[in-house]
Image (spheres, helix red, strand yellow):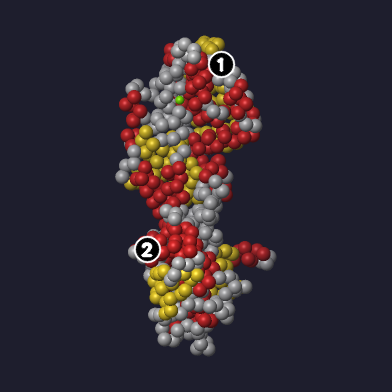
């Protein structure tokens, strides 16, 4: 072993650079953070070749006084904290005093800076950490940092850089996030002479989203706002019909700092509940503000991560913020006749929760409409004497009892039902709809004022069941109905033992299952809302529930499976009254337009488009 010595400063800086500066995007991030800390209101970034060759950050911040310029390039030189305790009061983005010396150590760096009260500016230049120039220059107030030939003197690092196109992407990504975190600042990005984006700098986060993501996402955003305890939450989430295959479009900001936070990511995703399809991720920006004492910002050299003093509180509040936005805004938006009518007032949650209307009806023949397609169904102990015949399964599934069906009225009259969910003058309250019929035994057609709705009967019913079951489960347990004869299921040894092991969980879900030998079970109750389910489906359902039983969020997953299995299928014929009920129930759900898997429930064609297709307008 060699003798122990202290490394010289250049070597130490090169080593530190390894932690702080990974790629051109890290330089952009550090320099932009410095600009923000310096109070800049406009920040221009220009890169060439993905920043490998050249990058320049120009800000109009307060600049550095001449005498302090060389000090800024010394290790651990910072104007932002004075002592370790200050770390828990940090409101600036930088505090480590490492970025400038580190970047200067591994590139050719030039800085020109001027404060408002200095007659001239200062230019300082480094090459591989060696100071090359220090002189006075004429300059505007602010700071310009130019970094050329990044990693020219650290070949191992250089080799690790990707193609320019991919480094460019990293730069775009981080600058976009920084711009979202600071909507009051105007950001401009130019790459190889081409302007990539400019943000307005007027404080409007939505406008920043438009600048960096474009109109498809820009026009589908919902605002998130919540004040809870010591946390203020602001942000934007995209409607659930626009989503991504990864978490790339999720941006998390804490006290103005762009951070990576799996905690916040899962909170946001949880907030969407089942609105997104599986393994799809939301587009979201969530910005938290809190007293710095609730945070530890010094847990990562590149300051990418932070630690919350109470992460479960943060998780809960973020989740609720997102959930509230989606619940209140979505149900309203879905209802407005024209989704472009952004200014229409938001429906209150109460309005959405109004009880459904019951439509008394009787078919013309006096006979109950029923499914033509015959599906085997389970006999129930509590079934009324006049019990449904097998060919009435779908009627049962939708939630009708023969008594209800036999009352009064006229089918045509009922089909004029007004969808009065609220008595005030909201567009929701006035919405009229009329079921026209069924198409391909798969879609329910309805006329809703100036729109033609094609409703997927399966997903619609799925959505209804999902919400009903969820409500029951939240209240306590899912309502169950006893079977007249327990259903014998041959599940095999492993599954049977699993079923028994998960017995209490299954009971909560409405299934009472008992042992019947080592590989057999008896199902004694099933959820009332799934009364239309067949024996085969019930077996499959239980197996699926068991398969998910191990996971923490099995309840949610199970609700989805149960509603899918319990819902009418495509291909089942539905009578008019049954369709009426289906649509009514659907409209009373919180999210009538997306199924638990995230598929659309209703396709809406508006009159103008239809007229246009016929050449009428
Ligand atoms: P830190 O940001 O952690 O303090 P840096 O190495 O990034 O460390 O910067 C060192 C110091 O240089 C900062 O504390 C700040 O005073 C000054 N500085 C750096 N960049 C700028 C800038 N763009 N405008 C004004 N001052 C700056
Ligand atoms: Mg800094």
Residue at image location 53% in from the left, 55% down from the top: 277
Q: Relative to 570, is 6 above or below?
A: above
Q: Is residue 356 visible?
A: no
Report crowding for label 1: few under 14, some 14 to 19, many 20 or more residues within 10 A (C-alpha).
many
Tell me, for residue 504, which label it has, or none. 2
Tag 2 secondary structure:
helix
| x and y, in percent, of residue 121 in the image | 49, 15
The answer to whether residue 314 is above or below residue 488 is above
Q: As drawn, which residue projects farthest toward the right?
A: 615
Res. 46 in view: yes
Numbered tag placed on residue 128 in the rendering: 1
Give the x, y percent position of residue 525. 41, 72
Q: Earlier in the sequence, mark 1 or mark 2?
A: 1
Of the numbered discs in the image, which one, if any, rests on residue 327? none
Q: How far apart are marks 1 and 2 (CA)?
A: 67 Å
Residue 334 % position (x, y): 49, 60
Relative side of 479 to 333, left or right: left
Q: Nearer the viewer, residue 539 or 28?
A: 539
Point out the frontmost of discs 1 and 2. 2
């Amino acid at each position: 072993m060699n003798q122990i010595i202290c490394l010289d400063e250049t070597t130490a800086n090169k080593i530190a650079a390894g932690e702080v500066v990974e790629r051109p995007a890290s330089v952009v991030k550090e320099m932009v953070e410095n600009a923000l800390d310096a109070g800049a209101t406009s920040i221009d970034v220009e890169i060439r070749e993905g920043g490998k060759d050249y990058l320049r950050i120009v800000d109009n911040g307060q600049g550095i006084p001449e005498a302090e310029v060389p000090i800024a390039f010394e290790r651990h030189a910072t104007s932002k904290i004075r002592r370790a305790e200050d770390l828990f009061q940090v409101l600036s983005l930088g505090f480590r005093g490492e970025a400038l010396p580190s970047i200067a150590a591994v590139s050719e760096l030039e800085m020109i800076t001027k404060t408002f009260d200095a007659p001239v500016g200062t230019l300082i230049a480094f090459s591989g950490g060696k100071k090359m120039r220090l002189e006075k220059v004429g300059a505007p107030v602010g700071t310009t940092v130019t970094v050329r030939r990044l990693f020219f003197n650290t070949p191992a690092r250089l080799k690790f850089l990707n193609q320019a196109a991919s480094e460019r992407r990293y730069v775009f990504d981080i600058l976009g996030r920084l711009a979202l975190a600071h909507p009051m600042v105007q950001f401009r990005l130019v790459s190889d002479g081409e302007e990539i984006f400019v943000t307005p700098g007027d404080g409007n986060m939505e406008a920043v989203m438009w600048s960096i993501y474009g109109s498809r996402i820009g026009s589908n955003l919902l605002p998130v706002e919540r004040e809870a305890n010591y946390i203020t939450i602001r942000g934007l989430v995209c409607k659930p019909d626009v989503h991504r295959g990864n978490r790339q479009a999720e941006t998390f900001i804490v006290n103005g700092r762009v951070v990576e936070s799996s905690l916040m990511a899962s909170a946001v995703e949880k907030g969407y509940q089942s609105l997104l399809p599986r393994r799809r991720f939301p587009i979201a920006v969530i910005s938290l503000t809190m007293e710095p004492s609730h945070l530890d910002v010094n847990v990562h050299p590149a300051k990418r991560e932070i630690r919350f003093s109470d992460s479960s509180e943060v998780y809960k509040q973020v989740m609720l913020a997102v959930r509230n936005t989606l619940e209140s805004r979505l149900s309203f938006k879905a209802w407005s006749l024209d989704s472009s009518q952004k200014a229409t007032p938001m429906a209150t949650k109460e309005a959405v929760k109004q009880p459904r209307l019951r439509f008394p009806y009787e078919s013309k023949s006096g006979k109950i409409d029923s499914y033509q397609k015959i599906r085997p169904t389970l006999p129930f102990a509590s079934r009324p004497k006049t019990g449904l015949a097998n060919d009435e399964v779908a009627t049962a599934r939708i939630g009708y009892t023969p008594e209800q069906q036999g009352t009064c009225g006229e089918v045509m009259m009922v089909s004029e039902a007004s969808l009065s969910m609220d008595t005030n003058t909201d567009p929701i309250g006035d919405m009229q709809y009329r079921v026209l019929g069924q198409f391909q035994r798969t879609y329910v057609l309805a006329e809703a004022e100036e729109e033609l709705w094609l409703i997927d009967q399966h997903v619609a019913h799925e959505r209804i069941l999902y919400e009903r079951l969820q409500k029951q489960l939240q209240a306590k347990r899912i309502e169950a109905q006893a079977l007249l004869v327990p259903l014998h299921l041959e599940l095999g040894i492993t599954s049977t033992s699993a079923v028994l092991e998960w017995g209490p969980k299954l009971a909560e879900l409405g299934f009472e299952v008992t042992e019947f030998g080592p590989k057999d079970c008896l199902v004694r109750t099933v959820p009332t809302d799934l009364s239309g389910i067949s024996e085969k489906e019930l077996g499959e359902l239980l197996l699926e529930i068991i398969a998910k039983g191990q996971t923490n969020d099995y309840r949610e997953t199970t609700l989805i499976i149960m509603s899918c299995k319990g819902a009418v299928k495509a291909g089942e014929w539905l009578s008019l009254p049954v369709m009426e009920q289906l649509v009514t129930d659907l409209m009373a759900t919180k999210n009538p337009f997306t199924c638990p898997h995230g598929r659309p429930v209703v396709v809406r064609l508006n009159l103008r488009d239809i007229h246009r297709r016929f050449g009428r307008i």
